[in-house]
Image (cartoon, helix red, strand yellow):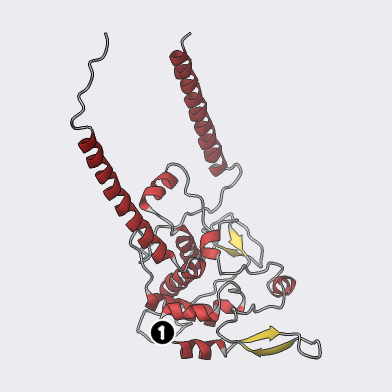
Amino acid sequence: MTLASFRTGLAAGITGLALAALVSVGAAVAEGGEGGTPHYPIKHPKEMDWTFAGPLGHYDLGQLQRGLKVYKEVCSACHSLKYVAFRNLEELGYSEEQVKAFASEYTVTDGPNSDGEMYERPATPSDRFPSPFPNEEAAAVANGGAAPPDLSLIAKARAPERGFPTFIFDIFTQYAESGPDYIHALLTGYTDPPPGVEIADTAHYNPYFIAGPALAMPPPLSDGVVTYDDGSPETVDQYSRDVSAFTMWAAEPHLPARKAMGFKVMIYLVILAGLLYLVRKQVWADVKRKPQAA
């Protein structure tokens, strides 16, 4: 057996094993969907139209400001935003004075003072958003045993798997919006459980929830719960879009700059490849190929 034939046989064997594994996984998923082990979410979120999508995406500052308002008036009662400082809000189009006024509405714990005691004071732009609860245990007690997650990185940390071969296409399309898609679907996906499905009295059915058929958080939004000053629709769908975009900004505030840099790098590489080809062609233009021996 030659080395070439051995390599060919080895490649064929690996390919066969890979195909068999894919078939087995597909059969297992199908079996789970027909009464076996359930797979969540029951429904996958649809792809939304975001301004920050694609290689030239950018944030809509108006939408981010509305999302901040939804977070402040609704979400901040339970969810922290501990990795975002008030001074970062200047990136949303607010002036330094507006940020100072916004921060002063919050109270943070500081210290110790000269007496060795902690004390409370109004927040400043250098402070981060304070948690609504003193610790995670207190948050769990106040919410039926489940502490609400921090929203600083939620748009990057929560997203259903897109599976093969979709995730391969995502590499070329630069799809990175699965987190906001999921958050929007979750916030708008509350519904009554279908016949035959029983959930706990303290749970709320949501087929888009990534960890099960129901979750402890009740529907947080309702039409008209937040007043918009720019005339945008005051609906659950619009609130969900805006706060989802805001959480994406909180998780990756420099996303537009990163995409712009990546686009410039790709253009540079294309031009460089063209120049290298022309240089190679010029250098070897006068070199005659030697005839190969029979």
- Going by the numbered disc 1, the residue's amino acid type is Tyr
Mark 1 lies on residue: 228
Residue situated in front as seen by the camera: 31 or 41: 41
Q: Position of residue 276 (x, y in %)?
A: 28, 42
Quadrant housing the C terminus? top left
Rendering quarter of residue 238: bottom left
Q: Secondary structure at mark 1?
A: loop
Q: Residue drawn at (22%, 22%), measured in percent from left and top?
A: 289
In the displayed structure image, the side of residue 168 where residue 192 appears, left or right: right
Q: Position of residue 209 (x, y in %)?
A: 55, 59
Q: Position of residue 100 (x, y in %)?
A: 52, 89
View extreme (left): residue: 286
Q: Residue drawn at (52%, 60%), measured in percent from left and top?
A: 156
Residue situated in front as seen by the camera: 260 or 202: 260
Residue 60 visible within the image: yes
In the displayed structure image, the side of residue 77 where residue 190 appears, left or right: left
